[in-house]
Amino acid sequence: MVRLGAVTGGAAIVVMASVAALAQTPAQAARPAITRALADSAAGWNAGDLNRFMAAYKRSPDITYISGGEVVRGFEAIRARYAGRFASGGDKGQLAIDILDARPAGPGYAYVIGRYHLHRAAGAELSGITTLLFEHVGTGWLIVADHS
């Protein structure tokens, strides 16, 4: 514990705070919840469960997905883009996502830099960087912008 004291009018005011709480930014404090959301989404991908995979995305017409020179706007459009991969029954691979950095991006938002790994049965691995903007919605964190 850290004690910060000040004397005001002869009375000592003591403020106690946890060093860990002082050192954490809001995005760092949100990191465990964001990590869980991404892990659950990856588990949905790996199980072939599109709804579980998409649960990490905010259900909004305003969210954005950018990949391969294409910009897709809105939850339903992003879901439709992924639906083809899930419906094909082909080797989507096993997805894992590592968080490299998490930073605050304003009240209720966190900017996350991650690395995705897609291990395919054929042995080829795809890997790349993703940038994600999360919004704190209700009791959880949801993706509102994804650039992968």
Image (cartoon, rainbow, N blue to C red):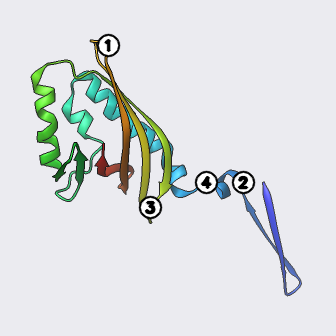
| Relative image position of residue 37 (x, y in whole percent) | 38, 39
Q: Nearer the viewer, residue 37 or 1?
A: 37
Q: Estimate the spatial distance between the alpha carbons at disc 1 and disc 2, rounded to whole Å.
A: 46 Å
Of callouts 1 and 4, the N-terminal one: 4
Who's the residue at 18% across and 51% down the image? 71
Q: Nearer the viewer, residue 141 or 126?
A: 126
Give the label, 1 or 2, closer to the camera: 1
Q: Estimate the spatial distance between the alpha carbons at disc 1 and disc 4, rounded to whole Å.
A: 39 Å
- Relative to 37, 26 lies left or right: right
User: Which amino acid is tagged 2?
Assistant: Val
Position of residue 90 relative to residue 27, above or below, is above
Who's the residue at 22% across and 42% down the image? 68
Label 2, secondary structure: give it: helix
Who's the residue at 42% across and 61% down the image? 108
Of callouts 1 and 3, the N-terminal one: 3
Label 3, secondary structure: give it: loop
| Relative image position of residue 10 (x, y in whole percent) | 89, 84
> Does the CB distance between marks 1 and 4 fall below 8 Å?
no
Mark 2 lies on residue: 19
Q: Estimate the spatial distance between the alpha carbons at disc 4 and disc 2, rounded to whole Å.
A: 9 Å
Of callouts 1 and 2, the N-terminal one: 2
Mark 1 lies on residue: 123
The disc label shown at residue 105, or none: 3
Give the label, 2 or 3, closer to the camera: 3
Of callouts 4 and 2, the N-terminal one: 2
Label 4, secondary structure: give it: loop
Mark 4 lies on residue: 24
Who's the residue at 26% across and 28% down the image? 45
